[in-house]
Structures are given as C-alpha cells and as structure tokens.
Amino acid sequence: MTDITSFDAAEDRATTNSIPRNPPQRALHLHRELGRVWANDKGFWGQITAVSHTTLGLRFMATAFVFFAIGGILSMLIRAQLATHQGAFLDTEIYNQIFTMHGSIMMFLFAIPMLEGLAIWLLPKMLGTRDMAFPRLTSLGYWCYLFGGLIMLTALLFGVAPRDGWFMYTPLASAVHSPGINADVWLLGVTFVEISAIAAAVEITVTILRQRAPGMKLTEMPLFAWYMLGTSAMMLVGFPPLIAGSVLLELERAFGWPFFDPTRGGDPLLWQHLFWLFGHPEVYIIFLPAAGVMSMIIPVMCRTKILGYGAIVAAVLGLVFLSFGLWVHHMFTVGIPHMALAFFSAASVLVAVPTAVQVFAWIGTMWKGQPQLHLPMYHILGFFLTFVMGGLTGVMLAIVPFNWQAHDTAFVTAHLHYVLIGGFVFPMMAAVTYWMPLITGRRRIKGLGETAFWVIVVGFHGTFFIMHLTGLMGMPRRIDIYPDNPEWVWLNLTSSIFSFVLTIGFAMFALDLLLQIFLGKRESRDPWEAPTLDWAMPLPSPNYNYASLPTLRDLDKPARDVILPLARGEGALPGAPRGRREFLVTRAINAEPDHVAILPGNTALPLVLSASIGVFVLLMLASLYLLAAFALLPVAALIWVWVRAMAPSGDLRPIEIAPGTSLPVHHHARQSLAQSGLNALLVADGTLFASLIFGLAFLSVVTQGPAAPPAGAHTMASLVALGVIGVVMMIAAWIATGVGRGTAQLGVVLNIVALVVLTWLALTQMDDPTVHARDALRAAVAGYVALHVIVAAGMAAFVADQYRRGEITAQIHGGYPGWRKWQSFTTATTLIAIAILLAQVFA
Amino acid sequence: MRGASAFIAFALLAGCDTGLSTLAPAGPVAADIAWLWWVMLAGATLITVLMVVLLVVAFGRPKDTGSRVWTHGMGLWFSLTVLTALLAAGLWVGERIQPRDDDAVVVRAHAFQWGWEFSHEAADGTAVESNDLLHIPVGVPVDVLITSEDVIHSFWVPRLAGKMDAIPGRTNRTRIQADEAGEYDGLCAEFCGLNHAGMRFSVQAHANWPPDLNEAEQ
C-alpha cells in the first residue's frame, strides 16, 4: 500500500517543471464545451463518421469478439467432425475450408484487431492525451478490417472460402493445385485487413513516442506503453514480409509469374520463409500486448508497484529482437542442414529467457504485494497455469529432434492453443474485466464471472491437455477422418466433449459482460485505486478523455488525487475554447512539450476510402484486372482529398496551454505527427522492399531449380535507360532538399520522366516475367519502384499545388517535408534496385 | 500439471504396440527422440509444479525478497541453465540420428496427390518399385531420399523416426532404422489437399535383404 501513495520524488520534480497550473474552472462547463467539440455525430450516421479512439477502439474489440465467436463455432464443427473416427459429418472440402477459416479468423480477424482495439482505446487514456495521432486513420483501419473480414466470411457462406490451411503453403495454394477463387479470397482479404494492422502500428508508434503527458519520460512510462511500442515496431517489420508474400502469390495466381513454382525457377520454400518471417514475430505481436496488460494489472491487484521495471523493459526489447531470428523453427522438417537448424533452435530456446524474466518479475510482484482475488486476478492465474505449460511445450518444440516427431501433429495444435489462449485470451479476459467499469461506468454482477472462469479453465485443459498425447500417438493435423486408428477415438472424443464445455464458458463470459452493460449498478470513480492516468477520469470515460491534460505533477499519483484537478481544467490546454479538437504533442525521449496538434473532426471519408479500396479488391477477386487498375484512380483521388483536408486554415496563432506557456500549432512545428507517422510507414515500406530483395537473393543463391533463360536485357539501350532513371531520381532527391514552387514542379517532371523511361524499359527490354521466377521477381521490384515514383510525383504535385494556393510560407512547410522524405526513400530504393540488377547481370 | 501423472499412465497404456505412436519406438532413431521426450516431460512437470507452488505462496503475507532474485536469479540464470542443458542434449541427439556417409542402404520415396511410390535396389542393382509399401532391411540404418511430384507432403513413420518433407524441386534425405522385422505404419504429415487423411503407407522391414518379394507375397 505504501508504495502507491509515496510519491515525494515525483513532487520534487514537478516543482521544477515549467508548466504552471491553469486556474480552476467549473468542471461541468468544461465538460459541455469539450463534449460539443469531441462528441460523435448523432445516431447511425454518427457511427459512420466517428473518428474517436474510444468509439473505434471499443468497436474494434467488439467486432473482434464477434469474429472470435464465429471462429469458435467453426472450431466446434471441427471437434464434432473429429469426435468419431469415421467423422460422417462434414465432407472433406468443407472441412478443409472450416479449419483454414478457423485459423485465419482467429489470427487475422480476432487476435490482431483485438490487440489493436485495446491499444487504440487504452493508450491515449494511459498516456494522458485526447486521441490517437491520426484519428481518421484509426477509422480507415477499422473499415478495412471490417470489409476484409466480411469478404472472407461471405466466401465461407458461399462455400468458396480458403481451404489450403491458414499458412497457405505453395504449391498447394497455387493456381494449378487450388483452382477457383478460394486462395484469392485469403490473399486479397487478409492483405486488405492488414491495411488496418499497418495503420494501427504507425499510429501506436507515433502516439507513444509523441503524445505522452509532458514530463512522462520514455523510461518512466507505464509498462503497457513499452509493450505496445515493441508490438508496433514488430508489426511495422513483421507484416511487410506477409504482404510481400501475399502480393507475389496473388501475382503468380493471377498472371502466372512463377515466384513459387519449382518447374520455372521458383521455390515453394520462399513462401514459407516470407510467411514465417511474419508468422513467428506474429506470435509475439499477439503475446506482448497481453503481457503488457499483465504488467499493469498485477501490481494493482497486489497493491504494490511492479518489480523489476528495467528488467521487464529489457526483456521486451530482447523479445522484439529475438523474435525475428527464429522463424525457421516452423521449418525444421523442410530439409535444412542440421547445423543450420541448430542456430535457429538456439534462438528459439533463447527467446524463452526474456519470457521467463517477465513471468518471474510478475510472480515476484505478487510475493512483494498482497494479491487480492478479484475477477481479473482469476484470469491472471489462468494465464500463469496455461501459458507456462504452453511455453514449456514451446521449448520442447524448439529442440530439433523432438520437433521432427511432433511437427504437424496434434501436439503442435495443443501447444499453440496453450500459448494463444493462455498467453492472449486469458490476459484479454483479465483486461476486459479490469477496464469494464471505464467502458460502461457500471459494476459487474457478482458470481457469474467467476463461474465462467472455472468453466473455461476446465473446458480448456480438458480439450487441449490430452491433445498433446493425441499428437504423440501419431495423429497429424488437418485430417478429417481416421478410420484405421481406433486408439485415437477416446482421446478425440474427450477433447470434443470438453471443447463444448469451453464454449459454454466463453458464452457465460460474454453473458456476464452483457449483464454488466445493461443491468450493472453505477460504479464509483477509480474502483481499483489504481496509480495510472487511465483511471483519472469520470466513468464511463468521456470522448475527450481529459478536460485538461495531465502534466508531470499528475504522474505517478493515485488516480483519484488527479481526477478533480484535471476535470476542473487545472492541467494543460483546458477545454476547447477555439472550438476544435486539440492535444499536446511532446518530444520523443524526454516528453518536453513541443506543439499543439489540431485534429480533424468527424468525417465519412475513411469509410468512402476503404470502400473504394474494397471495390479494387472485389474486382481483383473477379479477375477483372483492367477494371481493377482503373479502380485505383478514385483511391488516389480520395487520398488527395484526405491530405487536403489537413491544409492549414483558420487561427494558426500560438496557443497558451497554461499561464505564460505558449506553444505553436502543428503547422509551424519542426517535426509534426504526420512526419513521425511517415517515418514509421517508411520503416514498413523499407521492410517490404527488403522482403522482395530477400526473395531475389533466395532464388539466386538457395533455389536449385532450372536455370533462367539467357536474359535479353543486356542491350546498350537498357543500360542507358537504367542510367537515366538513376540520374533523374538522384536529381529529384537533390532538388527536393531545396524549397520553392519551381522545385516542386520540377520534381513532378523528373518523376514522370523516370516513370516513362521505366515503362519503356519494362515494355521493350525486360524479359517475360512468366517464363522464370528470377525475371518475375525483377519485374516485381520494377513494379515496386514504379509505384513509389508515381506516389513521389503525386506528392510533388501536391506541394506545387500548395504553393499555388499560397499555403506554404516561410513558417509553414505544408507537404514539403513529407515529399522530401518520400523522394529520398524512393531514390534510395531505386538506386539499390538498379545496383542489384547490374550486379546480377554482370556477375 | 494436475493430469501429469495420469498423462504418463495413459501414455504407457496407450503407447504399447500401436501403429503410429512415437512413444512406442521400434528403432534407435525413434527411441532416442522418445527418450528426449520423457526427459523433457519430467523437467516440464517439475517446472510447472514449481510455478504453482510459487503462485500459491504469493497469496501469503507480503515478502520482501528483492527484485534481482526474480529477474536475474530466476529469470536469467535459472532459465539459461535449464535451456542450455536442454539445447545441448537436443543437438547431441540430433547429430546422432543424422544421415551420414556410411554406406547406408538407400531407398526412394516419391510422394504425389495422393499416394507414395517407393523403390529400393534389388540384388542385381535394378530398382524395384512399389506403391504405398516401402521395403527396408532390419537392423541397419536406411536413408530415404524423398521427393514430390506436385505439392508438399511429408514422409513420417512415427515408430522409426521423425518426419521429413517431400518438396517439389528438392530431394530430402532422412534416416530410419527398424530393430525387428515386421510392418510399420506411415503417413503424410503435411496437409496436401483433399485426400490428405488417406495418404497412408506401410514400411516392411525384412530380415533378408534384398527381399524376395515374390516369396513374401505367397
């Protein structure tokens, strides 16, 4: 108890902080003023136009919960099928679709959106700000998620859902062996959904780095923020290989570019590498937010502070690093030499160390404090029991010889459910039960939640514990019948029976939430007596979060001590006197106040933009490729409108955030949120490029397929053309470092010149990409470069247009820094691509 | 954890003489891996019990133990020690059961949707082909060269050794060995489409090598 209330150190620092208190105002007046500015529009239309992180975060989580239920129903069908050895229930085609969709839904439509939703909903509250960095992007991400998910579900209803397993191994998923649109539904649908993952990763990174309350140093922020920073970094680097792989496989299926076809120089293992380069970090992308929740809730439940803050941060960073070095442990049986496997085995074993550091830090925290058995604590104990066992079987699977036996058996099915349900679903249930009062403002009805927990624990372990044995007895994954193996019947029947118990448990959990929402009594503020800012607000949380923003003196204090001062407007930037949405932006490391960001309000633009992307996806699915290309025009136009909406207008004078302390608005800022966002996006983009280059290198060095036909592109003309492109792009990057209307116009011209030359090169000189995988990958790299040159031309045109409108001045740079950055990136990737091509040609 | 002892009992009961059980090894390769499994199971059980005890004790009075005991002592050193030992054991077993250049008998397995074509050398050096039935000698290591016609499959005879994928465009090699003559069940372990569940095969281990198959059929 004493730990929570002794904050003398923080008080000392607060006195030296430069942001003075604002004079108190009437809380109700502030509430109304902010409510008018920050509230969603009324009614159904209000749901369309909402960009609020609270609304969208909850909607992400609610939608994810619905997909969890759908994925759960599919798993019931699987278990019903496997309950007997003849399995006279589903035919094999439908069964294959069901297990593929079960995995895909749980991964891409439940787990990832769930953690995105939690982060989007919680981070601004926890960091002391009013919204995410890019509210319209939050909304765009949601609609892309919803539409992508609906495309996949619709396919399931019509019996054309993906059927090649959730990791879509080629050649099984290639056009020859998987005709029809089933695999395309997966590739296009999942990639559509991943727009939301990249969007969320960019937003989360920027929000954590730039929107922490003034004085909340990186090294002192709540651990959940550290975990989410690690997660978003992993998403920025982890998702691009999957996106690259999906685009390549779709190109192969649609146009016959043989990236993965061994008869034409491709390699099925390239798909596996790209997939698991995503797929293994994915496991930690899912685990880290859950672990972040544990690190927040355990100390509160135990009335103490977290033990080993620094060690936990180090463990998170270690996990982020290590998780990119062990994807090959999904590929121990593909024939890689044993000594190479040993390296990945060691990395896979090593990743258990930072995990162990966290688990022991949590247990140490429980020893240090006085654990109280509230409902979230039940789920935390469920986490410990389940996740530890899943982690132990994970270590077993990292041991190469054992993996050769257990791989692709029910043992792995058991292991991954222990890890995912133990390491994600239990912590999420702890999170939901913990933050429910903040969501609903209501108290739960006692008893049902505890019962649900016990039913879930019994159902879960009853289903999956025995499945380890089923796997060791030789039962492989993804079979629908086992007529010759009566010895597996009792194992499977037991799993099937308990799986229904598990489902009943989850249904009870959902019922408990519904009862709390509709029948719960009013909860009083700060019900857990927590020391974090997320509870320093009224219940349920208002759309604007804080009537005035917390500063250093409000940190590390019991939430209840800062609720009132903040509500009365004594923090920074009180109310909404200018009638627009504003929050503070701080510097990345030390959280010094930097400027005030002015945010866009409610708008249907994200819905329209994602719908137009949806049209493109549907046209691709229908194989109407020419029409699909034209469908990108409205997408480009809408992006232009999107950026125009943020052009400087209205009152751009500095804003007094506290007596005597004024900050510029973001148009005058040296490093705006948009620029930070672009940095994050370029990390993902650079990884995408690296994935393509990895593919090129892999096919050249590792693949032993038929040699490429002699290339026809060594002509003098093509060398000159490559030289022209390189020089033109270097000039473009160089002039973009200057300023002025003329340079922007010149930038447009230079990019168009480069594009024209590149198009000529592709049409007349490049080898047919359908003949050999090497040429197909070169064409893909050329396509990547062309796309970036087009965007660079568009950005230069946007800047030229801003000059024409007189929006860019000596103080306001508008789109200039963004174009400059993009142009440099495009030039760099173009030059690298040219260098690699030349090296391959002359080697 | 609560089922750990029951688990072992079930495993012993169910593992006896069943066609596909990794826990009923019938050759040195599978036996080595089965050993590794039992050791790991024992260790995992101990660690799980330790965790439960630590959690139960946490519900007593607050205890001031110092944070480094947990983060460094338990988190770092305890886990590193256990994991290093385990990794070394895994590498040792892995190296022991590798195919090596020791003039082992070589047979071929070619997978397709959905079945297996096997071949071995007859006494006169000609290749003898057989569908869904692989012939091997007893008591000596046999290297299987594994290829695929169409999609990825996986060659797995649980009682003899771990699995190895059959990948189009590649030839993979794995080592199996049977201690006694007889028939062993095998299956395709990598999902390969509609008839994946039916892609079974047998391995016949012969005391006389090369076998006289006409005699065997009578």
Image (cartoon, helix red, strand yellow):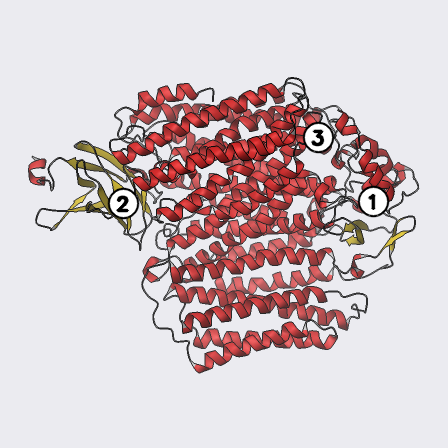
Residue highlighted by disc 3? A305
Q: On the rendered structure, is B50 left or right of A553? A: left
Disc assigned to residue B99: 2
The answer to whether one can see residue A218 in this image is yes
The chain letter under disc 3 is A
Q: Secondary structure at mark 3?
A: loop
Of residue A226 and residue B197, the one placed in the foreground of this image is A226
Q: On the rendered structure, is B65 left or right of A26? A: left
Residue B204, image quadrant: top left
Q: Could you tell me how far apart the alpha carbons at marks 1 and 3 are, in whole angstroms?
A: 38 Å
Disc 3: CA contacts within 10 A as few (<14), some (14-19) or many (>=20)? many
Q: On the rendered structure, is A623 left or right of A814? A: left
Residue highlighted by disc 1? A36
Q: Residue at x 46, y 82 (%)?
A: A717
The chain letter under disc 2 is B
The amino acid pointed to by label 1 is Arg
Q: Are marks 2 and 3 in contact (CB under 8 Å)?
A: no
